[in-house]
Amino acid sequence: MPKPRARNAVYAQSGGVTAVINASACGVIEAARRHRSHINRLYAGRDGIVGILTEDLIDVAAEAPATIRGLRHTPAGAFGSARFKLKGLEQNRAEYERLIDVFRAHDIGYFFYNGGNDSMDTAHKVAQIGTELGYPIACIGIPKTVDNDLPHTDCCPGFGSVAKYIAISTLEGALDVASMARTSTKVFVLEVMGRHAGWIAAAGGLAGRKRGEPPHIILFPEIAFERELFLERVRQCVADFGYCVIVVSEGAKYPDGKFLAEAGTKDAFGHTQLGGVGPVVANMVREALGFKFHWAVADYLQRAARHIASRVDVEQAYAVGRAAVDYAVQGQHGVMPAIKRLSSKPYRWKIVPVPLAAVANVEKTVPRNFITPDGFGITAACRRYLEPLIGGEDYPPYANGLPRYVRLRGRGVRRKLPGGYSLK
Amino acid sequence: MPKPRARNAVYAQSGGVTAVINASACGVIEAARRHRSHINRLYAGRDGIVGILTEDLIDVAAEAPATIRGLRHTPAGAFGSARFKLKGLEQNRAEYERLIDVFRAHDIGYFFYNGGNDSMDTAHKVAQIGTELGYPIACIGIPKTVDNDLPHTDCCPGFGSVAKYIAISTLEGALDVASMARTSTKVFVLEVMGRHAGWIAAAGGLAGRKRGEPPHIILFPEIAFERELFLERVRQCVADFGYCVIVVSEGAKYPDGKFLAEAGTKDAFGHTQLGGVGPVVANMVREALGFKFHWAVADYLQRAARHIASRVDVEQAYAVGRAAVDYAVQGQHGVMPAIKRLSSKPYRWKIVPVPLAAVANVEKTVPRNFITPDGFGITAACRRYLEPLIGGEDYPPYANGLPRYVRLRGRGVRRKLPGGYSLK
């Protein structure tokens, strides 16, 4: 039997970055090096899919092995990521054809796309169009999203670390407020990410175990916000405990579907850009109840907080990257390595392939039985689910008081296609 | 020579809490246990000076030694702190007399007051009035403030940890923005504490070493904010580097002294901006230059972030607590243990006593030679000063993914004075 010819591979990061997306990159790169008979050279799109469309590829082989190892403890997108959603096949078939042109020019046989919902959809479409155009390509999606909203996987790499950061921040901020509530701030509001799914907000709930322990109120996107109910709960908390800690999701909305914080601007995908629900809620409390308040908005700090990453999350991020390559060289395509939970205590898991078609454009929100009947807290079932995901610490190395995060050389691959390409 | 009679002591926490104020408490308590011949029982004011005035004292001896050891790694004020400034002696002499009454009732010979500027002033006044009233008491101030604005000490315990947190957060947030700037956010604003002194903002500057490395702009309270100059710098940064990271102090102000945060700007709906200099600056950039932006407000998270405390800061916080007791039993009073820098590389320091009278009500701001001529960055001299203060990590123990912060039993001391006391 003739040995299959080795082909090249391309890896790209997509969408909002996380504390551990580079750990997935590290898994891809280290696995590819073990499969030389299948994967010849590994390239990466500079700034994600944008780099592939513009034939701006990074030569991964030019990076030192120590740099590649360092990706495991370096947050954000070392190769550059992009908020760039390919349009539907009908609307812009040319974009997909351009991808195939670039792949063909560089003899790309494997495409590893590391992203969330939209990216799984893109990877799925690229696989389809490749086949149609007579250029079959093994497309593997690698899950990544702090939003934790991909289906058919126990969790999404990136989420465990933001969950750990938010749980710890809630705990620490609450200790601060508790120690001074008698003469100072009575209400503390922490705004967290999560546009449609309240997983990150739910993670704030891990900070408290017993009744009365903060956070006292969580505002989920999944639960319609009822102003009077909320204010009454705040009043009661301050009366009972002397203070009130609130974790609010950026996606919290009124019963009519309107976000509490509507910035009015839209992002590249046409989604409304949020941010600022923390001060909105804090001011609502002050106006209605008069309590002295403080609010914090963690914003990017939460998803880049590699300094306090979850060890489980780092291990899973690396594992899905490695599995993506293993699947590809085994001849699988159109799949995503997913995490399957085998047990919660102790937490045991394995990686299994799921079809991209089943993952693309399906959003997993927090189920109702994970939220207490009053809508303001998490249940024991939710805690059983979440707790293992923040397990363990995985500290980066330090020098002069700061983490030693690596930077890539980022040497470009020589272009093969004539002319340039303008992004639509 | 007759052995001096052992007296009781009281410890109180004051003002905004920090990640390491409990490490100072730990130093006080463990040192007091080594000086039984001088210090009989150690009490703490519940919620600081408020607990002393209301004769609501915590019996420290009722806490398990493991809990006391755990204070070293537990943030915020375990005994409760207070924003409660005693009035001047002329305006409310009765408050000071009440303190002496409580001290007399409980045979208190030593008063350890752990706080910032106001607290050093209070400790100083208590010492004076005690002498006047024929109840001499050894008053020792223990420095604590994230603002780092006390004079006659190299730094203030609490600052090193918030500096480390802000430097790391700036680094991590900047990596996030850098990886996505091509298609997404171009300007990231991080708001930090420091109403009058820009030390915390300066610490953000540690994140970058070379030209072009973020943060690109720091806005100090010490430098009058010039809108046009600032906007031009933002525009230039985005042109040169593709993005711009801004660290802004909550105390940044216009040349006329008005805080940016109080500028009274209105949002698109005509509502007054909801406070927070971070969003004010971000919106200013968007309106003038149109860049997509994100902003974060760390608020209490920064001063409670024990999970990433500076080891140097923890050691200094413990050392000033221990020294306070050592000084007291040596017969010193009216002093504050201060940190004296012996060398920067390697960082060596020792504890020395300074008179409370010299510390009270003096505010140390960032000197002009620590800020670059353009007013937007830190100089090499500033870096030499700051870098040692964030040196080393001192991780708390973890269980189930969260730090194991201790909580006190907080058993009260039996009251000895008749009737109650109403706070003025």
Image (spheres, coloured by chain):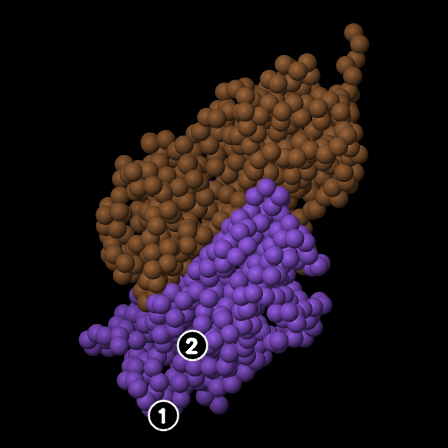
Chain colours: A purple, B brown
Mark 1, residue position: A132
Q: Provide residue B100's location: percent of width, then percent of height.
A: 68, 23
* Residue at image point 48% right, 90% down: A1
With B21 as the anchor, is B166 left or right in this view? Answer: left
Tell me the number on the disc at residue B266: none
Q: In the depicted view, which residue is nearer to us: B244 or B128?
A: B128
Residue A23 in view, yes or no: no
Q: Quadrant of the N terminus of chain B?
A: top right
Image quadrant in which you'd find residue A211: bottom right
For badge 2, the amino acid type reads Ser
Mark 2, residue position: A119
Disc on the earlier residue, 2 or 1: 2
> Within 10 Å of the Cα at label 1, are there few (<14), some (14-19), or many (20+) other Cα atoms?
few
Q: In the depicted view, which residue is nearer to us: A369 or A305?
A: A369
Badge 2 marks a residue whose secondary structure is helix
* Residue at image point 64% right, 69% down: A374
With A67 as the anchor, is B72 left or right in this view? Answer: right
* Residue at image point 65% right, 53% down: A239
Q: In the image, is residue A84 above or below residue B113?
A: below
Q: Nearer the viewer, mark 2 or mark 1?
A: 2
